[in-house]
Amino acid sequence: MRDIVVAKFGGSSLADKDQFIKVKEIIVSDKNRRYIIPSAPGKRHSRDHKITDLLYMCHQLATHGLNFDEVYNVVEERYRGICTGLELELNIGEALGEIKSNIKEGASKDYCGSRGEYLNGLILSNYLGFQFIDPKNLILFNDRGQLEEEKTEMLIGEKLKDVKYAVIPGFYGAKENGDIVTFSRGGSDVTGSVIANGVKASLYENWTDVSGFLMADPRIVENPKTIEVITYKELRELSYMGAPVLHEESIFPVKKHGIPINIRNTNSPEDHGTMIVDDSTTEKPRKITGIAGRKDFTVINIEKALMNEEKGFLRKAISVFETNGISIEHIPSGMDTVSVVAANTELNGKIDKIKEELRIYCNPDTITHDTNMALIAVVGRGMAKTKGISGKVFTALGNSDINVRMITQGSSKLINIIIGIDNEDFEKAMESIYRAFENE
Ligand code: ADP
Ligand code: ASP
Ligand code: MG
């Protein structure tokens, strides 16, 4: 592999002029940092707005025929402030004006959302003296809005072959007909990963506002330790269960060529951060790697005597969820019971219909539901080889007076234990599990 580093900088890393200065220092300190992926400006403080949110708001107002000038002014001011602060000669007003008239004329939601990255890319390329490359010519989506992986890999390889240094905005690409398509929220991480794969980078650096992937969410647990090394698989489990540091879809593109990801802190560049690697790591892992969780799940409990002897019972139950378009999270089961767990957002307004259909198709003895469950994933590649981990998790929860309502485990190579608890106990549970393992 060549010594090419792809570096993605998140929203808080590019929120204002001072952050841009830090970012430039980081980029120029290593000449291998060749392809730079910026997000849109994020929050400068907790009560601030993310530019992407404001742009979606403009789109929303415009679709209802309402005036969006006031919101768009805030967007304009942010970008103008950055350009003036950095003393750039770039005419950002021209791009801002063009985008505004496109929104007025009914531009799509994806187009509007993507402009935050587009504008920040123009500014960063001007500030660095790097070429600006619009990802609409690199990252290709099909008509259903899915990434065309192979074509994209080829396009990137071709178009960046002779480009030494470039800024490529994150978050979006386009269909063959030129229509802009975005990834889901937080998707600049995916752009970085797709570019790293396309140029066969030796490293994908993901610069954010924390010194790596932490063992627990720092907004819930005070001062959690940094995870030094984590595998792609563990990271996916943690991201999926609620740790937003890296978009969960960022793993697939780099996994193909085993390109490591390094999570780093723009505000503390001397910290080594977290290395995300393939499974092949040999060092001795900690007992657990990290924990993450989410609130607001519903559990539907179906009970029927001798359920286990009735062929096709589970299939019938699951097909009810399938025909209603609901993604199921877990299906813990016992002798005469099966529970189906799904996110509340999936079930919104459909729960009565689903229970009724389950009654018709499965003829259960009882069927109940509860919408108040939180899930916590305790993740670690070291778990399978270490005794007593689950004992320790449940002792910690018991000592904190927390009632465990559901337990499931990853079935192949054990790397996770999922615990269901009441929403109200979520923060206390995260804290108590973390404290039980922080020094192990
Ligand atoms: P960016 O804007 O750089 O993409 P994000 O806001 O998407 O950054 O992700 C970083 C944030 O994720 C951190 O500021 C932190 O509050 C939050 N976070 C949640 N769980 C974790 C965790 N386990 N480790 C690190 N950060 C976490
Ligand atoms: N700006 C986009 C968002 O807010 C993408 C990203 O930040 O990665 O979701
Ligand atoms: Mg992010």
Image: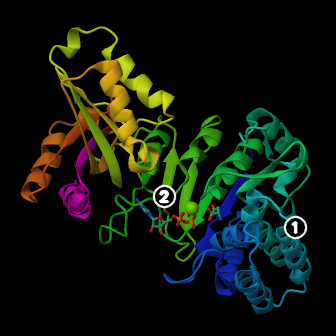
Residue 108, compared with residue 21, is above or below; it is above
Residue 308 visible in rendering: yes
Residue 340 versus residue 330: which sits nearer the camera? 340
Q: Is residue 222 left or right of residue 238?
A: left
Element at label 2:
loop
Residue 111 versus residue 223: which sits nearer the camera? 111
Residue drawn where x is 74% and y is 89% of the image: 81
- Quadrant assignment, res 175: top right
Residue 287 visible in rendering: no
Where residue 345 sits in the image (x, y, percent)? 44, 50
Cα distance between the residues tagged 1 and 2: 34 Å
In the rendering, which numbered label is found on residue 105?
1
Tag 2 residue: 244
- Quadrant assignment, res 122: bottom right
Where residue 427 sits in the image (x, y, percent)? 26, 63
Question: Few, some or many C-alpha atoms within 10 Å of disc 2 (few <14, some 14-19, many ≥20)?
Answer: some
Read off the magenta span.
418-440
The answer to whether marks 1 and 2 mark residues whose Cβ atoms lie closer than 8 Å is no
